[in-house]
Image (spheres, rainbow, N blue to C red):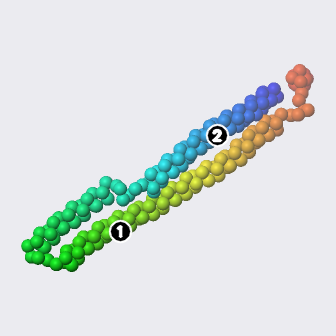
Amino acid sequence: MALLSILSAANGALGLYSGIKGMFDSAKAKDKQERLIKDTSRMENDWFRRNYFGDYLNSSSSRAAIKRVENTLRKQNEQNRAYAAINGATPELAIARNQQGMNMMDNLMTNLASQSDAIKRDVDAAHLRNRQAIAARELSNLSLDEKMAAQSATGGFDLFKDALMGLNWGNEKDEDEENSEYDK
């Protein structure tokens, strides 16, 4: 009978230890998850600000495209002046050719602005997807925490209940009485 009481008490103590250790380990893991999600969220926001508010008209590829068009316009203007000097072109022809060059520059700037808008839309869409993924992860963690807490509480209560059920409350007999019954 004493062995059963000792085993029941040990079972109850083990259940209590397991429950308390599980709570501390769970809290530590939850803190790490929260830090990771916070860091991920901060990095995502930094990435978004860097890419969404970037100056795409001043990027190296945009500056190179503008420089190519400027060089082309300069060469065309030199050719137009040389042609006008040799052939005696009218001022209207020179104005029309210069207008073509300005249209080329206007088209380039319009295309660069359009590309900038497309990049911003893509960055915004990626940011939205990333934020939704982070929110889904947080929701998943909260749901898992809720389930684990319920299971831990149920398991701890079950072990404690089993330990209490293993004891014969008020029905214990003294070992001397048990031994005297068998001696008869």
Q: Which residue position holds label 1?
A: 110
Q: Is mark 2 on a helix, strand or loop?
A: helix
Residue at point 9%, 76% (across, down) = 87
| Residue 1 sits in quarter | top right
Direction from residue 61 to residue 74 in the image, left or right: left
Mark 2 or mark 1, which is nearer the start of the sequence? 2
Q: Residue 180 or 99: which is nearer the viewer?
A: 99
Direction from residue 180 to residue 50 in the image, left or right: left
Residue at point 58%, 54% (across, down) = 135
Q: Is mark 1 on a helix, strand or loop?
A: helix
State the CA–CA distance, disc 1 to disc 2: 56 Å
10 Å crowding of disc 2: few (<14), some (14-19), many (20+): some
Residue at point 73%, 34% (across, down) = 16
Residue type at mark 2: give it: Ser
Figure check: 36 above or below 89: above
10 Å crowding of disc 1: few (<14), some (14-19), many (20+): few
- In front: label 1 or label 2: 1
Q: Where is residue 3 in the image (x, y as percent from the top left)?
A: 78, 27
Q: Residue 20 or 85: which is nearer the viewer?
A: 85
Quarter the C terminus occupies: top right
Q: Which residue position holds label 2?
A: 26
Figure check: 33 above or below 125: above
